[in-house]
Amino acid sequence: MSKKAKAKPKAAMKNHAASSIVWFEIPADSPERAKKFYGSLFGWNIKLFPGMTEYWHIDTGGGDDTPDGGMIARKHPGQPITNYVSVKSVTKSMAKVEKLGGKVCMSKTAVPQMGYFAICQDTENNTFALWEMNASAK
């Protein structure tokens, strides 16, 4: 496997200050059409994520301080763009979401060798994701 194929998105690798947006995910009815749109509009480089068949890495080209993102096939009508927010502990943050009146929609899930995420909903019905860096995630 080439060094490039092993590369992980810079936003997912770099340590960020707690509570900053470190990744975003765009759902698309037609990923090919969306790739063309965002590539032409912003100059983003969008390629299939190494080792995956239906997940594309969006390289925004903004350097280490600008988050990259992913593109997925839309799972349900009205599925929004999801922002991933860095936290020290997904487990503790999920509990805090619920204590503050929000909802955990998808519990803590591992992204092997990268970290953990959970999908949540705020009190205004907006979804977002919590992201915890952890190279030991399985």
Image (cartoon, helix red, strand yellow):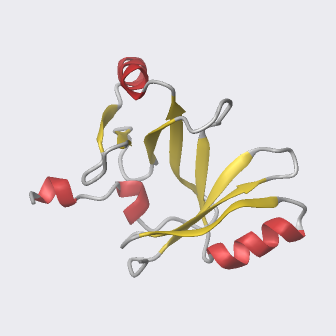
Between 107 and 13, which is closer to the camera in this rendering? 107
Question: Is 20 left or right of 30, judged from the image as shown?
Answer: right
Residue 2 horizontal/vertical position (percent): 9, 57
**Residue name at image x 89 percent, y 65 percent:** 100
Question: Is 97 left or right of 63, judged from the image as shown?
Answer: right
Q: Which residue occupies the extreme front position in the image? A: 76
Residue 5 horizontal/vertical position (percent): 18, 54
Q: Is residue 59 above or below residue 36?
A: below
Question: Is 75 left or right of 35, judged from the image as shown?
Answer: right
Between 60 and 129, which is closer to the camera in this rendering? 129
Q: How many marks?
A: 0
**Residue name at image x 46 percent, y 48 percent:** 67
Q: In the picture, residue 45 is in which quadrant? A: top left
Q: Is residue 2 above or below residue 59?
A: below
Q: In the picture, residue 93 is in which quadrant? A: bottom right
**Residue name at image x 66 percent, y 30 percent:** 77
Question: Is 8 left or right of 67, judged from the image as shown?
Answer: left
Quadrant (top left, top right, bottom left, bottom right) of the N terminus: bottom left
Residue 31 horizontal/vertical position (percent): 41, 28
Q: Which residue occupies the extreme bottom position in the image? A: 136
Q: Is residue 84 above or below residue 68?
A: below
Quadrant (top left, top right, bottom left, bottom right) of the C terminus: bottom left
Residue 55 horizontal/vertical position (percent): 38, 44
Between 125 and 60, which is closer to the camera in this rendering? 125
